[in-house]
């Protein structure tokens, strides 16, 4: 039963819904065994489930959304690539001595047209996560990403980046190899690329580690994804001197797709299936593909220079200040 | 009177009590080196650009002092001073961001954590940005981003080299994602500046970390650093906690970055102006004669236009002689 396998990953606020769903399944089973017609009751309960789902998912707090964004079953970069692309060929290595498993990418076809697609890759389970370093990319990962984007630029392929990281890797090696420089270089060079760049936060957009592949012509976010300047946990520890205040920090930092749309940072919110992307990965992938194709069509009608200028203008207007 | 008595009397006649010492430090008459503890007459220390003459420790300097050290007298023209911070998220942690801002504004006399402007550096026109660590740890929010962006754009438009003195803990959390996006915005401005083949030199001072390191601090044609400055992406404590291991003493120091190839040179503060002048003049086709830009005491904007013109003229001369 799917509810059984999903159980270990149930989030607190998903529980009432899950209980109701398993009750419906139970009644159905009992009815089938005893040969009684309970379709009226089931219909009623199902309507109730739909309503409950809507109530729960429309009233999520920022820290609940953060939980959803980090959901272990949330579709990852490679899941989306598999679901929306054909002819996928993964590229490896930064040509400087390292291949980062936390940042993956390659060439593929999207709706028949060649693209370069890349993103942070989290693991499925603990073992996989250790191998993927929990989606925290190293300097070599950002340099591999840049290598792929340069490739796209040379062969006139649009670039699609999928963002899903708690942040760039903070370790001794990362510092030694210039984590700051690797991200900074991407920030500057992504403004210089001629081809269209579409960036989507599919899960967790963690600070500079997210931005390192996040400069594009369009910034999109799935509705239950988050994008933060610092993780709410870190922010609570620094500003409140108390890591347990992280739900409060999550609200104060304005990390949800709606907040960021209002602040003029993202362009578009991608809808998720009614119980979140993890409940229906293929549904989420369809929404992503549709948005990518629509935006690509717009962007391909512009010249390279227009795109570069508009890209700069887009980031140029970000920020709030007064001329007092 | 033996020599010993003389010393004993001298101590008696001039008792420097701790109280008095503290008062004089507070008056700003004397300054104590935070590294070796030696007391120095503040005026002497300033004359030595706030570098301890005993141990060579570089004490923190504020943005005004930094501008005085780098820009020729009476040639500084501030840009965009009117840009001031607001509280876009109505952010409140243990204290409201609004209150924090006005406290720091009062304490420092600055509107936010950066001063930008143009001036002459040993006679060479330059667009200079100076971050001020006193203002909320030099953190980068919308104002820092906007002022640096406008400075770089001005440099691009006027053909000026850009120098930015970095001193920052990183992005300003109180402005959330707006702060993070300043990293991209400034990097974009630098891309345009670079496209015009203009020189950009960041100078990394203590401390340069987080979002500043992951953007404009690391994008220089040359990257200079002050001795022993802490420079890094992630905080040292964060790394220590994640890895549960003791980090080497020189980890994330200017010297460490030099060793691993991320800065070009560690330049003592007393030689910074001369070094910048050397690098800038090496990248101009025609050296600019000192005094060329002076019109009495004041320097006007149009004088700063000259490098581009001179650059072009020189190119023309080169082409004609071909």
Image (spheres, rainbow, N blue to C red):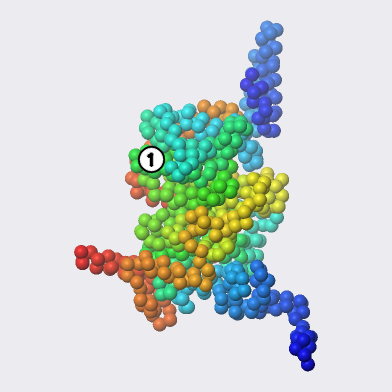
Is residue A268 placed above or below A113 in the rendered structure?
A: below
Res. A294 in view: no
Residue B207 placed where, x, y %?
58, 60
Res. B291 in view: yes
Quadrant that contains the N terminus of chain B: bottom right
Quadrant that contains the C terminus of chain B: bottom left
Q: Which residue is disc 1 drawn over?
A: A152
Residue A42 placed where, x, y %?
66, 17
Query: What residue is rendered at 58% in x and 39% in y?
Result: A133
Q: Nearer the viewer, residue A163 or A266?
A: A163
- Say whether residue A97 is left or right of residue A301: right
Query: What residue is rendered at 69% in x and 8% in y?
Result: A33
Is residue B48 placed above or below B91 in the rendered structure?
A: below
Query: What residue is rendered at 55% in x and 50% in y?
Result: A175
Query: What residue is rendered at 66% in x and 14% in y?
Result: A28
Q: Chain of mark 1?
A: A
Residue A284 placed where, x, y %?
52, 30
Name of the residue lying farthest toward the front: B2
Residue A148 placed where, x, y %?
42, 40
Q: Circle 1 — which element?
A: helix
Quadrant of residue A204 in the image? top right
Name of the residue lying farthest toward the bottom: B1
């Amino acid at each position: 039963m799917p509810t059984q396998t999903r159980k270990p990953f149930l989030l607190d606020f998903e529980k009432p819904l899950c209980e109701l769903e398993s009750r419906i399944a139970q009644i159905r089973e009992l009815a089938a065994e005893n040969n009684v017609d309970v379709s009226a009751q089931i219909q009623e309960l199902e309507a109730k489930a739909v309503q409950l789902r809507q109530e729960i998912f429309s009233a999520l707090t920022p820290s609940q959304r953060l939980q959803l964004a980090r959901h272990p079953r949330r579709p990852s970069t490679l899941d989306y690539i598999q679901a929306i692309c054909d002819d996928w060929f993964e590229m490896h290595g930064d040509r400087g001595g390292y291949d980062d498993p936390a940042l993956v990418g390659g060439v593929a076809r999207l709706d028949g047209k060649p693209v370069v697609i890349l993103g942070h890759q989290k693991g499925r389970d603990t073992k996989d996560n250790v191998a993927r370093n929990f989606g925290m990319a190293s300097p070599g990962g950002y340099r591999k990403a840049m290598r792929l984007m340069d490739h796209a630029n040379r062969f006139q392929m649009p670039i699609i980046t999928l963002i899903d990281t708690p942040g760039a890797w903070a370790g001794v090696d990362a510092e030694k190899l210039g984590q700051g420089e690797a991200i900074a270089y991407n920030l500057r060079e992504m403004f210089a690329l001629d081809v269209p760049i579409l960036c989507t936060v599919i899960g967790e957009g963690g600070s500079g580690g997210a931005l390192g592949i996040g400069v594009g012509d369009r910034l999109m976010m799935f509705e239950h994804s988050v994008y933060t300047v610092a993780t709410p946990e870190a922010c609570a520890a620094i500003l409140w001197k108390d890591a347990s205040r992280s739900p409060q920090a999550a609200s104060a930092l304005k990390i949800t797709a709606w907040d960021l749309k209002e602040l003029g940072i993202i362009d578009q919110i991608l809808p998720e299936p009614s119980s979140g992307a993890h409940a229906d990965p293929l549904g989420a992938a369809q929404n992503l593909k549709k948005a990518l194709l629509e935006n690509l069509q717009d962007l391909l009608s512009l010249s390279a220079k227009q795109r570069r200028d508009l890209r700069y203008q887009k980031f140029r207007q970000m920020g709030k200040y007064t001329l007092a | 009177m033996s020599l010993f008595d003389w010393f004993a009397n001298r101590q008696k006649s001039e008792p420097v009590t701790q109280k008095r010492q503290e008062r004089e430090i507070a008056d700003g008459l004397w300054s104590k080196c935070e590294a070796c503890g030696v007391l120095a007459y503040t005026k002497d220390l300033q004359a030595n650009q706030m570098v301890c003459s005993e141990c060579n420790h570089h004490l923190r300097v504020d943005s005004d002092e930094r501008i005085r050290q780098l820009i020729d007298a009476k040639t500084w023209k501030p840009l965009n001073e009117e840009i001031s911070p607001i509280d876009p998220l109505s952010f409140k942690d243990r204290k409201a961001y609004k209150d924090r801002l006005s406290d720091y504004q009062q304490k420092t006399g600055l509107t936010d954590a950066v001063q930008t402007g143009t001036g002459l550096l040993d006679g060479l026109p330059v667009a200079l940005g100076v971050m001020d660590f006193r203002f909320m740890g030099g953190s980068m929010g919308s104002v820092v981003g906007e002022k640096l962006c406008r400075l770089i754009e001005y440099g691009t438009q006027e053909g000026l080299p850009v120098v930015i003195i970095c001193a920052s803990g990183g992005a300003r959390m109180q402005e959330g994602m707006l702060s993070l996006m300043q990293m991209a915005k400034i990097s974009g401005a630098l891309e345009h500046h670079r496209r015009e083949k203009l020189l950009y030199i960041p100078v990394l001072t203590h401390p340069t970390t987080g979002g500043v390191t992951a953007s404009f601090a690391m994008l220089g044609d040359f990257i200079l650093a002050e001795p022993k400055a802490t420079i890094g992406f992630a905080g040292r404590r964060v790394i220590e906690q994640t890895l549960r291991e003791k980090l080497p003493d020189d980890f994330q120091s200017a010297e460490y970055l030099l060793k691993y190839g991320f800065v070009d040179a560690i330049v003592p503060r007393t030689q910074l102006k001369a070094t910048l002048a050397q690098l800038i003049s090496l990248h101009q086709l025609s050296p600019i004669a000192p005094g060329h830009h002076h019109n009495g005491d004041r320097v006007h904007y149009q004088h700063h236009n000259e490098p581009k013109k001179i650059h072009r003229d020189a190119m023309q001369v080169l082409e004609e002689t071909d």
